Image: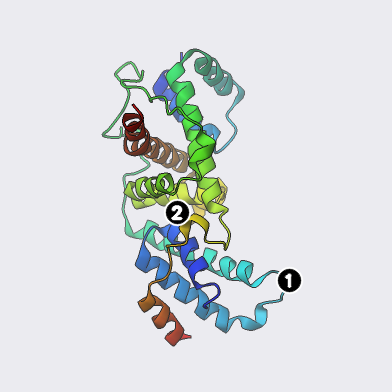
């Protein structure tokens, strides 16, 4: 527990964006590990084994959440409120130039904090779909099962999630750093 | 003719499954001509890259060293084990 607690917590926190849910799942993971001790073969490292258990717990958590929130989320015919396009379908205000060297961004904790903050501003189902697809790297099939949506639905959800996330990052990070730089 | 609205949707979809040839070509031609959509695609790829790298963070705390279980949660978990 002392050795892996914080690691599992960070792992869960990154995916759930909710401290108390993350702590609960870490606890459940240790309990499950204790019960299933005999199944640990030593074929993988202890850390990998624990993370494997935690992953299942996270998927269960997303599954529960997708049942709790009723959402008109993935309705392809509805337009998001903050539609960036004009009637002709062209950009109203287009994306701004983010400039700089994007490769450096990952070394900046503050940028990553904004990234996570923007992710948690999405609706839970959008954020969970994005997390499964981009942070976990799961494929569509798997995500559709967990979130109980059709594939077409999932693509709409991911499109909206990426678009909102991009806009949030632009206003919270890139526009600000440009102002500071000038 | 595809609009920017269509193309942003296709850019996202192309990140999740392979598009039929016709749509793919339509999207690529639009991207050659439209600065904003081309920028949009680069930014989505940067977002994907950031998310993947976050997902790949291992046991070393690195930048996230300050994010730890609270003392209270730590005690609670220890007690439950």
In the rendered image, which quarter is residue B49 located in?
top right
Q: In the figure, A116 relative to B4: above or below? A: below
- The residue under the point 55% across, 47% down is B52
Q: In the figure, A63 relative to A120: above or below? A: below
Residue ID for mark 2: A147
Q: Chain of mark 1?
A: A
Residue B44: where, in percent of width, then height? Answer: 48, 34
Badge 1 crowding class, 10 Å Cα cut-off, few under 14, some 14 to 19, many 20 or more, is few
Residue B10: where, in percent of width, then height? Answer: 49, 28
Q: Nearer the viewer, mark 1 or mark 2?
A: 1
- The residue under the point 50% across, 45% down is A107
Q: Say whether marks 1 and 2 touch (CB < 8 Å).
A: no
Q: B64 or A61, which is in the foreground?
A: B64
Residue A11: where, in percent of width, then height? Answer: 50, 61
Q: Secondary structure at mark 2?
A: helix
- The residue under the point 56% across, 61% down is B60
Q: Which mark is residue A43?
A: 1
Upstream in sequence: badge 1 or badge 2: 1
What's the coloring here?
rainbow
- The residue under the point 35% across, 51% down is A120
Q: Chain of mark 2?
A: A
Asked if one can make out residue B44 in the rendered structure from this viewpoint, the answer is: yes
In the rendered image, which quarter is residue B72 located in?
bottom left
Q: A37 or B25, which is in the foreground?
A: A37
């Amino acid at each position: 527990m002392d050795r892996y607690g914080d690691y599992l917590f960070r792992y869960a926190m990154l995916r759930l964006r909710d401290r108390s849910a993350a702590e609960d799942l870490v606890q459940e993971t240790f309990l499950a590990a204790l019960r299933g001790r005999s199944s640990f073969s030593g074929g993988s490292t202890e850390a990998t084994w624990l993370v494997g258990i935690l992953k299942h717990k996270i998927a269960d958590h997303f599954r529960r959440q997708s049942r709790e929130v009723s959402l008109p989320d993935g309705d392809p015919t509805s337009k998001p409120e903050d539609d960036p396009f004009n009637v002709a379908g062209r950009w109203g205000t287009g994306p701004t130039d983010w400039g700089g060297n994007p490769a450096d961004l990952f070394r900046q904790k503050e940028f990553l904090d904004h990234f996570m903050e923007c992710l948690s501003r999405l609706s839970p189902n959008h954020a969970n779909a994005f997390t499964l697809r981009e942070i976990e790297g799961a494929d569509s099939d798997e995500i559709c099962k967990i979130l109980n949506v059709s594939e077409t639905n999932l693509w709409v959800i991911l499109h909206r999630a990426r678009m909102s996330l991009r806009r949030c990052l632009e206003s919270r990070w890139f526009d600000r750093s440009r102002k500071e730089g000038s | 003719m595809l609009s920017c609205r269509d193309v942003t949707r296709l850019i996202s979809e192309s990140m999740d499954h392979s598009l039929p040839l016709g749509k793919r070509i339509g999207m690529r031609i639009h991207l050659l001509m439209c600065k904003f959509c081309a920028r949009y695609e680069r930014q989505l790829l940067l977002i994907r890259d950031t998310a993947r790298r976050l997902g790949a963070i291992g046991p070393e705390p690195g930048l996230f060293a300050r994010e730890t279980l609270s003392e209270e949660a730590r005690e609670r978990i220890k007690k439950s084990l």
